[in-house]
Amino acid sequence: MNSTSLALIAALSLTACSGAATTSLITPLDTLPVSPALPPPTAPPVWSDEFDGAAGASFDRSRWTADVGGTGFGNQEREYYTTRPENVALDGSGHLVFTALAESPSTTFQCWYGQCRYTSARLRTTGLFAQAYGRFEARIRIPRGQGIWPAFWMLGANVDQVGWPRSGEIDVMENIGKEPSTVHGTLHGPGYSGSGGISGTDVLNSGAYADDFHVFTVSWQAAEIRWYVDGRLYHRVSPQTLPSGSSWVFDHPFFLLLNLAVGGAWPGDPDGSSTFPQTMVVDYVRVYRDP
């Protein structure tokens, strides 16, 4: 399967929260014997990107590869993903900045519906890094606005062989701009994919997630996956809590993805209230063996 096909299959899963993110199919956290506190890592990360480098420099191509194109990525997204520094580059202060831009009508960027209205970026570690189990986290300041869709997620490295959702997917963080105080963490697999993804939400008491950086973490063990924001547990799934008749497929390596989508089946299109450019600023991504 070529990279375009992989991107399309992977992106099909991003439609998963379009009807599932408001409810969770698991037992309420307060009925389970687990502390909500996330302990600090016990060893240095086994893989990380701190995004150090000169302003305007490209992402580290030994760590990340990029999707390029405007196929809609299975979600009716409106952006064309590029590797231009205008869309993804270091800022010189230890951050990687994803920038969604509104484009003037042009034949340069062709999307599934015609001339693309927006450009942005999407990176993944396919073929460069994948890991089963551990702690996966990123410190991110998300963008804001109707139709804006940032995500930090993971996809089974065997997607080419078994397809999606058999490969499994772990959405560490997704936000849609019309929900400024809410982020979603979701699990997708056979029997719980698309709008049936097993999702939990974290809602701020005040303000918007775009106001500041937050640390989004998944702690993945063989028998359970947990989601945290700033060390606060808000969602967990285990094989015992899956829908009847479905299977647990989280026993093999997954690779990482970061992207900033514009429009799509879940967030809807930008409207008159949306402003551009919008940026997703990533301070670091770190992976540990210890969950």
Image (cartoon, helix red, strand yellow):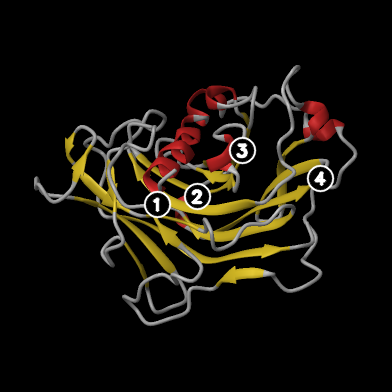
The residue singled out by tag 3 in the image is: 167
User: Taking 60 as reference, is 185 above or below it?
Assistant: above
Closest to the camera, between mark 4 and mark 1, is 4
Query: In which image quadrant can residue 28 be found?
Result: top right
From the top left corner, tell me how far across and down residue 279 is, in percent: 36, 57
From the top left corner, tell me how far across and down residue 285 is, in percent: 57, 64
- Tell me which amino acid carries mark 1: Pro
Residue 209: image tag: 2
* Nearer to us in this view, 76 or 274: 76
The residue at the far bottom in this view is 54
Q: Distance of mark 1 from mark 3, alpha carbons?
A: 29 Å
Residue 143: image tag: 1
User: Taking 60 as reference, is 150 above or below it?
Assistant: above
- Tell me which amino acid carries mark 2: Tyr
Closest to the camera, between mark 2 and mark 4, is 4
The residue singled out by tag 4 in the image is: 222
Task: Please report whichever mark, 2 or 4, sits nearer to the chain's N-terminal start.
Answer: 2
Quarter that holds the C terminus: bottom right
The residue positioned 48% from the left and 73% from the top of the image is 51
Closest to the camera, between mark 3 and mark 2, is 3
